[in-house]
């Protein structure tokens, strides 16, 4: 269980600077995976860093009554001039696993699959290689709660799938607190949600309610939970709708081509496009399933690739 | 995956002291490797720098024919002791300058505090310098130089005193230079004047008498002269050498440095 009591945080510590987080009171129960939502700069990553103990609150406190990981993400976590192996050894040692160091290094090496680069300085890594290493490293320890800050944002398809499977294998033993712009990812992994808006946090027992509330407070877009079609015509209808949504998102994304922020992993437009593409693929798969075995039962909800 | 090892809990499971110890050990391994292995010329410069200064000073003195003695001590051993003592202080002050910056990526782990790399680097520098000094003493003695201390215990105490002084300076400047980078540059520039003002190369006895009292404001002078007094039985130096004064500086700087590290821990981690 993680308890957050009367938490206040701001960055420039002179009077008058506004609070990034203001009077946050939350209790995150054991075993419940939570998605953190909020627009860019709403303080999602800040809250995650505070939960991970990387940052200290200005007021209030956070009680961690379980083993909490560090915020797993792209930024930080490695010392650039050390090799991947040396970084892994360092992290194993600070977690008190000196006696188990060989096994941990072997495990991470096997999971990351970066070959020779494991013995090269981390500063030479691509972002995909970094995320492979960071993921493998975090999985080498048995945390009760994993903190993920867009950890799944980069990497190729196969690795993303592998990371997902590895995480799924932990369900029941461990839970997640994750920041992600991908609504599909949030729906897949999280049961509950926290929406951050203007420094305040609201807890939702259901991630879909949280996603809906997030859109109500930001862009007014109505988001419905993806439904599994029961008939072929229904599936076709959904596909048509998904296609339209995808075209719209693509247009929006392309028209923002002169905005350099478009290529950042944080960018909302890009995530919206990814989500729309995902929905379209799902819808198409449903239709295909109906076509291929018309006589059969309703297709199961496909897992997102 | 089968796991025989259970990750310890942070709150209650593992005592703070044990966490700190494992962080220091991990940091020590990391710093040792980067200090001695990564930098290929690292070892070479550690040995060659004092040798070069000695060679230059000996040839200059040979040029001016001022004799092979400095107030009752042989010139070369006198120089070696001074250079080693000053090097110990200087490296303990300078190495922590970049310590926080170089380990920023590792502050993602809540177990690691900005003070850890600084403390570990100071410890490591002290160990390296002590080893180097012993090496010089051994090799020097084989070369028939008078490098066996007359009062070894006194030398060790003075050596530790200079280490403590450098440690305090390192703790303090590591915070200051990270918060105000310009001051880090000033500290680097101070290096050479300090070398000249500490009586490492120019004997303090040669300074005109009316200025000697100002030299005594510098705590390094006290440490170096005291160490030479312990090293060479016949050595005589200026009056007023007082180790209490050096320790006053050392303890003040250590306290100040630790206080700064506590006060600015959050700012040092950020950026």
Image: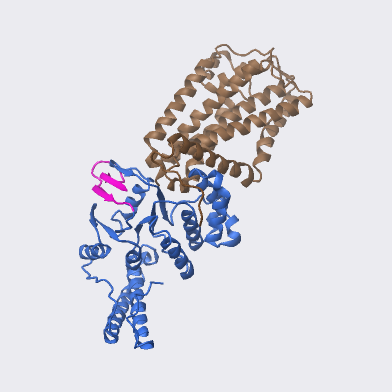
Chain colours: A blue, B brown
Residue at the spot 62% in from the left edge and 34% down from the top edge: B128
B151 horizontally vs B164: left or right: right
Report if residue B259 is visible in the image. yes
Report if residue B183 is visible in the image. no
Q: Is residue A143 magenta?
A: no
**Residue A22, how many percent across, how many down?**
23, 48
Residue in front for this viewpoint, B265 or A280: A280
Residue A275 higher or lower than A121, as above or below: below
Residue at the spot 47% in from the left edge and 60% down from the top edge: A131
Residue segment shown in magenta: A1-30
Residue in front for this viewpoint, B164 or A214: A214
**Residue A199, how many percent across, how many down?**
24, 52
Q: Is residue A15 magenta?
A: yes
Residue A269 higher or lower than B193, as above or below: below
Residue A104 higher or lower than A240, as above or below: above
Residue in front for this viewpoint, A279 or B187: A279
How many numbered marks appear? 0
Residue A195 higher or lower than A290, as above or below: above
**Residue A70, how many percent across, how many down?**
41, 50
A40 horizontally vs B143: left or right: left
Residue at the spot 47% in from the left edge and 32% down from the top edge: B171
A46 horizontally vs A127: left or right: left
**Residue A250, how many percent across, how many down?**
33, 76
Residue in front for this viewpoint, B207 or A305: A305
């Amino acid at each position: 269980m993680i308890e957050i009591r009367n938490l206040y945080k701001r960055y420039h510590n002179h009077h008058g600077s506004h609070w990034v987080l203001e009077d946050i009171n939350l209790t995150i129960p054991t075993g419940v995976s939570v998605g953190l939502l909020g627009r860019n700069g709403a303080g999602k990553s800040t809250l995650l860093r505070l939960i991970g103990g990387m940052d200290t609150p200005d007021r209030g406190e956070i009680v961690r009554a379980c083993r909490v990981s560090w915020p797993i993400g792209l930024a930080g976590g490695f010392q650039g001039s050390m090799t991947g192996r040396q970084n892994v050894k360092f992290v194993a040692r600070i977690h008190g696993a000196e006696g188990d160091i060989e096994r941990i290094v072997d495990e991470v090496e096997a999971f990351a699959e970066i070959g020779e680069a494991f013995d090269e300085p981390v500063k030479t890594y691509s972002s995909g290689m970094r995320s492979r290493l960071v993921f493998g490293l975090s999985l080498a320890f048995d945390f009760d709660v994993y903190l993920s800050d867009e950890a799944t944002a980069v990497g190729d398809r196969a690795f993303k799938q592998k990371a997902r499977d590895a995480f799924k294998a932990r369900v029941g033993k461990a839970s997640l607190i994750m920041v992600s712009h991908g609504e599909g990812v949030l729906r897949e992994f999280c049961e509950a949600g926290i929406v951050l808006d203007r420094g305040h946090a609201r807890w939702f027992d259901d991630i879909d309610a949280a996603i809906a509330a997030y859109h109500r407070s930001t862009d007014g877009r109505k988001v419905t939970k993806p439904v599994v079609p029961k008939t072929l015509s229904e599936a076709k209808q959904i596909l048509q709708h998904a296609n339209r949504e995808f075209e719209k998102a693509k247009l929006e994304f392309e028209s923002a081509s002169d905005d350099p922020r478009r290529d950042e992993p944080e960018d909302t437009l890009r995530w919206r496009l990814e989500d729309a593409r995902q929905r379209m693929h799902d819808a198409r798969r449903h239709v295909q399933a109906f076509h291929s075995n018309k006589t059969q039962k309703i297709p199961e909800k496909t897992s997102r690739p | 995956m089968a796991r025989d090892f259970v990750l310890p809990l942070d709150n209650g499971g593992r005592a703070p002291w044990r966490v700190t110890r494992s962080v220091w050990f991990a940091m020590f391994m990391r710093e040792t490797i980067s200090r001695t292995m990564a930098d290929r010329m690292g070892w070479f410069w550690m040995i060659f720098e004092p040798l070069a200064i000695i060679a230059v000073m000996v040839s200059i003195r040979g040029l001016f024919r001022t004799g092979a003695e400095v107030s009752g001590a042989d010139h070369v051993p006198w120089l070696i002791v001074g250079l080693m003592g000053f090097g110990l202080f200087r490296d303990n002050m300078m190495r922590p300058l970049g310590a926080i910056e170089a380990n920023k990526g590792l502050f993602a782990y809540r177990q690691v505090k900005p003070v850890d790399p600084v403390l570990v680097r100071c410890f490591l520098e002290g160990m390296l310098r002590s080893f180097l000094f012993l090496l010089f003493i051994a090799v020097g003695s084989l070369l028939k130089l008078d490098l066996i201390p007359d009062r070894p215990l006194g030398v060790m105490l003075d050596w530790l005193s200079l280490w403590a002084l450098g440690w305090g300076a390192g703790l303090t400047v590591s915070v200051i230079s990270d918060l105000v980078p310009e001051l880090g540059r000033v500290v680097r520039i101070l290096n050479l004047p300090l070398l000249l003002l500490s009586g490492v190369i120019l004997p303090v006895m040669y300074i005109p008498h009316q200025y000697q009292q100002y030299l005594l404001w510098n705590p390094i002078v006290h440490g170096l002269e005291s160490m030479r007094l312990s090293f060479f039985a016949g050595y005589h130096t200026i009056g007023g050498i007082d180790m209490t004064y050096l320790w006053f500086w050392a303890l003040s700087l250590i306290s100040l440095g630790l206080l700064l590290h506590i006060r600015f821990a959050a700012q040092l981690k950020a950026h």
